[in-house]
Image: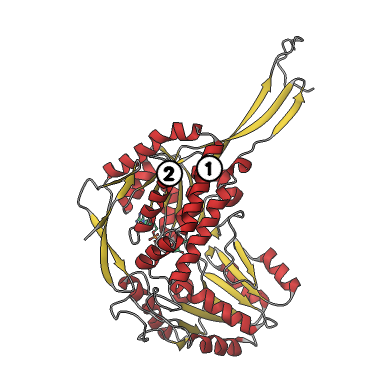
Amino acid sequence: MTKVMHFINGKLTANSSNRSGNVFDPALGKVVREVSLAEIADAQAAIAAAHAAFPAWSDTSLTKRQQIMFNFREILNANKQELAAIVTEEHGKTLPDALGEVTRGLEVVEFATGMANLLKGSYSESVSTSIDVYSIKQPLGVVGIISPFNFPAMVPMWFFPVAIAAGNTVVLKPSEKNPSAAIWIAEQLKAAGLPDGVFNVLQGDKVAVDALLTSADVQAISFVGSTPIAKYVYETGTAHGKRVQALGGAKNHMLVLPDADLDLVADSAINAGFGSAGERCMAISVVVAVEPIADELVTKIAARMKELKVGDGRRNCDMGPLITAEHRDKVAGYIEIAIADKATVVVDGRGISVDGDSNGFWLGPTLIDNVSTSSKVYQDEIFGPVLSVVRVSSYAAGLKIINDGVYGNGTAIFTNDGGAARRFQNEVEVGMIGINVPIPVPVSYYSFGGFKSSLFGDTKAHGLQGVHFFTREKTVTSRWLDPSHGGINLGFPQN
Ligand code: NAD
């Protein structure tokens, strides 16, 4: 069985021990390769390579750094089907969805090719007599990126193009559930001309993460994953003096006002609820229906669900399997909880027929109506193809439910009333908002991130906030003496 290795200092590198994990093809339900699980020594080697590469890379001209990003953009664009196939094999999402993920990552690469403009400082002449002030943005050093299983290509690309173009060096620790996309990316970065050591991949689990969080040679951490781990990463990383942005879990609501176009709403709920089998941090998992439209809306959603084809993502299907058998069983367990909590299971995804291997980790789209906010079905991030409907009597009641939630990643409102939508964008306590758009993932030149338990730290991913995260600013106050010397003055200069 092939073993996915680390990529350190420009080379595939074997682990220092035999510790390894299984990598599944979730549509086949079988192990397709193994992945090395780093020991502390392996993490130290990756960090040392990035540390050694930093002085030369940060001194490399902006023009050259951008050229390499341009090269990588071209290679990625020409070969994106190849990367998408790797994502589908180890994640299970359909090929078009995997291609969509790669394309969204590519957009961040394109954003990073404009780094020369983004790194411009400012200059103020004669702030005091003969004194000028200006600012310069400099890279931090070695940055660690720790990514989740659900976007093995896109989430790393939210961070490393910006980090690298800004002059930092990187150690990426991908999810051990789907480690191969990171290696493909490392090889293409090398082919694009990136010097060895600037981008390293460290395969592993908590051992690798802890080594990154505690190393004195790592300056910043970008983490994406579940909320408990995000909180842990934020607290541990900051306690070790690092700059940390830790994006956590989500429970995203779609508020549907009675004047909305219910066909658009039903289509959007299907796309946002069941795309990628609900394993998206921007999936809609709760439809908050303002009466009297709930009956009609549930009927429309359920009718569309009958048309969905579940199966192997390499075939012509709408939805693939879940990531592991354990996760599939956990998600299916929420259907039992819903029944116990007296919710209405309108469509039950268990035992559906699929266009795929019978050993795959299947669970069909599931719709649960009349979900109470006191139920775990409502409260937990299920992270699977389970869509809940909560019925409310007014906009205000719906807004309160959303604002009382512990997460604040994404939300959407569906309405034809511009005033109501405007009020919602002002009043809702969520970081990313869609208006008649169900998955409002910001484009690369805006920033991605939520509120509350969906983001620990002050700074979001990519866009200007990403540039801010991966740089620190120096402010220089300068005077070049002219023949008229200013003389001694112990006060602040005032003119
Ligand atoms: P996860 O938290 O299990 O794993 C994320 C990363 O943390 C992985 O690299 C993993 O190896 C590492 N990790 C796991 N356990 C650890 C531990 N005990 N100590 C240190 N490191 C550990 O998340 P996942 O299951 O891979 O991904 C799904 C989660 O990610 C969901 O909660 C989803 O909402 C979230 N997510 C959030 C966003 C966002 O932008 N907010 C985006 C994508 C995914």
Residue at image location 30% in from the left, 79% down from the top = 357
Could you say which is closer to the camera, residue 144 or residue 181? 181
Check disc 2 and give the amino acid type.
Val
Q: In the image, residue 360 lies at what x, y percent? A: 31, 76
Up/down of 112 relative to 317, above or below: above
Quadrant for the N terminus in the image: bottom left
Image coordinates of residue 397 in percent, x first then y, are 63, 76
Mark 1 is surrounded, within 10 Å at the Cα level, by few (under 14), some (14 to 19) or many (20 or more) other residues, namely some
CB at disc 2 and ligand 1 closer than 8 Å:
no
Mark linked to residue 54: none
Residue at x 37% of width, y 75% of height:
321
- Asked which secondary structure carries label 2, the reply is strand
Quickly name the residue at label 1.
67
Under mark 1, the amino acid is Gln
Q: In percent of the image, x 58 and y 51: which residue is there?
A: 111
Residue 212 is drawn in which quadrant?
top left
Q: Looking at the image, is mark 1 or mark 2 earlier in the sequence? A: 1
Which residue is denoted by mark 2 in the rendering? 170
Quick one: SS at disc 1?
Answer: helix
Q: x, y (%) of residue 302?
A: 51, 88
Residue 307 visible to an observer of this rendering: yes
User: Is residue 422 depicted above or below 465 in this figure?
Assistant: below
**Which residue is most to the left?**
18
